Image (tube, rainbow, N blue to C red):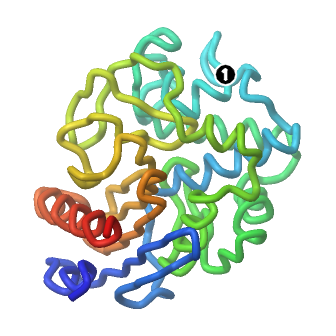
Amino acid sequence: MSPLDALAGWPVDHVSAAVVTANGVVEQFGDPDRVFELASVTKLLVAEAVLVAVEEGAVELDDAAGPPGATVAHLLAHASGLAFDSREVAAPVATQRIYSSSGFEVLAETVERATDIAFADYLDEAVCEPLGLSSTELAGPAGHGARSTTADLGRFATELLSATMLSPDLAARASSVQFPGLDGFVPGYGKHRPNDWGLGFEIRAEKKPHWTGTQNSPRTFGHFGQSGTFLWVDPVLTTACVVLTDRAFGAWSKPLWTDFNDAVVAEWSR
């Protein structure tokens, strides 16, 4: 039996999943072309688009953006001090890891101004078209408004495993800890000291509890969404996993996600 077979018993109406290695999707479950709301998994796509803008020279990580003293890098790493869902400043720059969806809206506006292209169009041109993500679109806020399929996110995860659109240095920086030592909350999983984050990608590090598996390496990075979705990349295992559901994240998901992810890591560690 495959670890993915356990998804048939999840208390959701629809679920689709894919396991990805450097060779692409190696196993899948459910309808790979069914479109799901991504919620905050959107931030991975948005971050990738911002990083492409950095590669193109349209913006720089050190460009001022957001509150006074904050930069594009601070916004990507949730270190700008912006509140979760407003443009209010909740803390000085680089003093706390305040998870901020509003910060990603500021990032989208920053790229729009620099490129004179609506951000949804920029995301499509910079990320979706090159990777063949034909069913992916940003239909709402940059922090949580995208929808996609496991077929598309499997291709995206393949890119995250082995970057072709970003330079090796920028890809490595994006998936490593930025502004280390900052404490903060992972929504649904409490406060972590520290709460490590890269440039748009959450870093698993030693966080407990966490939405990835207990056996995922500390270098694992990715994101989960309140719509019952997640995508993680474990560079030590050279494996990624995408799971999309249509049931909001809650008490049902925590034990199932842990058990499932541990089973995936065990299977692909052989």
* Residue 40 visible in the shown view: no
Q: Is residue 42 left or right of residue 206?
A: right
Q: Up-down: is 64 above or below 212?
A: above
Quarter of the rendering containing residue 188: top left
Q: Is residue 194 left or right of residue 50?
A: left
Q: Would you name the residue on which mark 1 appears?
A: 71
Q: Up-down: is 71 above or below 157?
A: above
Q: Element at badge 1?
A: loop
Q: Up-down: is 236 above or below 32?
A: above
Quadrant holding the C terminus: bottom left
- In x, y percent, where is residue 10? 16, 78
- In x, y percent, where is residue 75? 58, 29
* Residue at x 65%, y 75% (from the top left corner): 133
Q: Is residue 76 left or right of residue 115?
A: left
- In x, y percent, where is residue 47? 61, 46
Inspect the image, locate mark 1, and give the three-letter code of the amino acid beneath it.
Thr
* Residue at x 37%, y 81% (from the top left corner): 16
Q: Residues within 10 Å of mark 1 (few under 14, many from 20)?
A: many
- Foreground pick, 182 / 158: 158
Quadrant holding the N terminus: bottom left
- Foreground pick, 142 / 17: 17
* Residue 200 visible in the shown view: yes
- In x, y percent, where is residue 216? 31, 52
* Residue at x 57%, y 68% (from the top left corner): 22
Quarter of the rendering containing residue 265: bottom left
* Residue at x 63%, y 23% (from the top left corner): 66
Disc tally is 1
